[in-house]
Image (tube, helix red, strand yellow):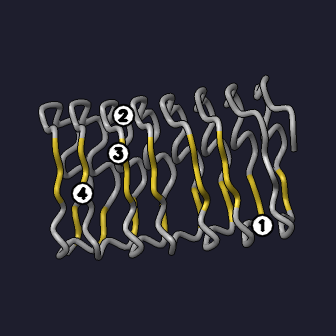
Amino acid sequence: TTLAYHAFYGCTLITEVILPDSITFMEGHAFNGCSALEKITLSENLTNLSYSAFSGCSRITEIILPDSITSMDAYAFYGCTALERITLSQSLTAISDYAFSSARALTAVTVPASVRSIGQRAFTDCRVLESIVFNEGLESIGYEAFSNCSALTAVTLPNGLVSLGQSVFNGCSKLASV
């Protein structure tokens, strides 16, 4: 079953979403702008997070992506300013452009070994992000992926990294060790 494009777009009174396991695919902007949304339970059979799926859901504090999710489109959690914790799917192959940009409460990220690329500005403006763990398997990090993550102090890049985009850590004023 597919959750349709704009299904709950701008529904500003929704506080909790529980997607049944019958949902396997989500189209764009499904919950974009649901500014009161605080809790999400995703289908264990969901395979994707669509373009701007939860953009602007400014009260979400935690996201757990089930291991069934293999793809995440751009802007999936853009502007989720209260987001503190994310658990990424162990099947995810890429973190797309602007995926968690402006998640200003996010403190730590562990990138699963399944992820091959991190898109441009994926974590830009995550100003309290202190810790990033990259696993072997990551091959590329895009333009400004972690720019303005001003609380970041140290980064260990994986051995297999092939491409490091321009200005990846621009504005990371506390970054002292790479």
Q: CA distance from mark 2 to mark 1?
A: 29 Å
Element on which disc 4 rests: strand
- Give left or right: position of 10 versus 174: left
Are the residues tagged 2 and 3 within 8 Å (C-beta)?
Answer: yes
Mark 1 neighbour density, 10 Å: few (under 14) some (14–19) many (20 or more): some
Question: Foreground mark, 1 or 4?
Answer: 4
Where 44 sits versus 151, above or below? below
Residue type at mark 3 is Phe
- The residue that mark 3 highlights is 54
Q: Residue 56: give its label.
A: 2
Q: Name the foreground residue: 11 vs 139.
A: 139
Q: Name the foreground residue: 87 vs 48.
A: 87
Question: Foreground mark, 1 or 3?
Answer: 1
- The residue that mark 4 highlights is 41
Please report the residue visible at 59 percent of the width from the left and 49 percent of the height from the top.
97
- The residue that mark 1 highlights is 139
Residue 116 rendering spot, x and y as whole percentages = 68, 69
